[in-house]
Image (tube, helix red, strand yellow):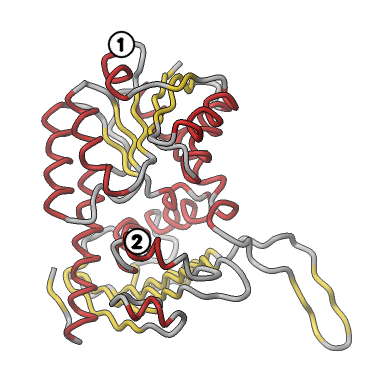
Amino acid sequence: MVSFCQIGAGRIGQIHSGNIARHPRAQLKTVVDVDTRAATILAERHGAAVGKLETALADPAIDVVLIASSTDTHADLVERAARAGKAIFCEKPLDLDRKRAEACAEVARKAGVPLMLGFNRRFDPNFAKLHKQLREGRIGRLETLIITSRDPAPPPLDYVKVSGGLFRDMTIHDFDMARWLLGEEPTEVFAAASALVDSGIGGIGDFDTAVVTLKTAAGTLCQISNSRRATYGYDQRIEALGALGMLRAGNVLESTLEFAGGTGVVGEKPLHFFLERYAAAYRHELDHFIDALENKRAPMVGGEDGVRALKLAEAALESARTGKAVAV
């Protein structure tokens, strides 16, 4: 059994704790949170104890520290866990500042501990199958990649203020997917962005709508379309076009039910938000992490991936503000 100390009992922490508790090779041993009441509720739900971080880091029975706390705590917690010799699973991003993210990833590397970053979309069954067939050459040489990612509604303004902005908070998942699917690093970023959905977001200098174009050294193009508003649900689609055809992973719908009548054919909406849409991805992500630990392999997505995604986010922000393409 792989024994976990989880830091963070909020929304994403509830997803991780449930998956750990249900996993046949994992055990949720300790929950840590500054909100003792939230930690207690979560711990009691899964038969864990409420503890202090210092105690958990010193406990030889703890194998993994899972970090699901607020973003501003991630880098410090990664470093503390690494120095204690614990394997680490950290939600994205490592930090909003790339230099700080690089520094904490380096601490984990020097400590020789596994570090996995929570870019869960790589583990979505549909996207994983698309990736596999890309690598197998089903559509020949990849020429154009199109990633659509739209939220059903904007998050609260208080969240946006501390999120790091659209590119670091939302598009960062798409930057990681682009790198993974392209199979080579983007060398140029051009972004156009606006505040069209929520004037409050524009008022604090952020964006809620963006189109980003990435270009690789080989000339392969990737277009990312983001919006904080899609009235029909959580819109998550990928298309890959190559010399031999196209691969497409569409939305996951509420059901396969359709109505067909004289006025047309009507289907169900996409699942409402990421908790439902990526439920399987979160489970497969944990499976992969535990497999990697047991087989002493590096996880598929680590600290360097987090740093590179942040680098693309910074370039996109610079491009959106200057109106110019930015070399990476």
Looking at the image, which residue is at 32% across and 57% down? 176
Q: Is residue 314 left or right of residue 241?
A: left
Looking at the image, which residue is at 32% across and 56% down? 180
Q: Which residue is mark 2?
A: 169
Q: Position of residue 203 (x, y in %)?
A: 33, 80
Looking at the image, which residue is at 29% across and 51% down? 93
Q: Residue furthest right?
A: 262
Secondary-structure class at tag 2: helix
Q: Earlier in the sequence, mark 1 or mark 2?
A: 1
Secondary-structure class at tag 1: loop
Which quarter of the figure has residue 89? top left
Per the model, the C-alpha gap separating discs 1 and 2 is 34 Å
* 261 over 301 or under it: above or below: below
The circle on residue 111 is: none
Q: Is residue 7 left or right of residue 239?
A: left
User: Which quadrant, please, contains the C terminus?
Assistant: bottom left
- For mark 1, does the 10 Å Cα neighbourhood hold few (<14), some (14 to 19), or many (20 or more) residues? few
Question: Viewer-proximal residue, 146 or 82?
Answer: 82
Q: Is residue 81 left or right of residue 142?
A: left
Question: Viewer-proximal residue, 183 or 160?
Answer: 160
Looking at the image, which residue is at 14% across and 49% down? 100
Question: Viewer-proximal residue, 96 or 121?
Answer: 96
Query: What amino acid does circle 1 point to?
Result: Pro
* 312 over 303 or under it: above or below: below
Query: What amino acid does circle 2 point to?
Result: Asp
- For mark 2, does the 10 Å Cα neighbourhood hold few (<14), some (14 to 19), or many (20 or more) residues? some
Q: Which residue is mark 1?
A: 60
Question: Viewer-proximal residue, 154 or 220?
Answer: 154
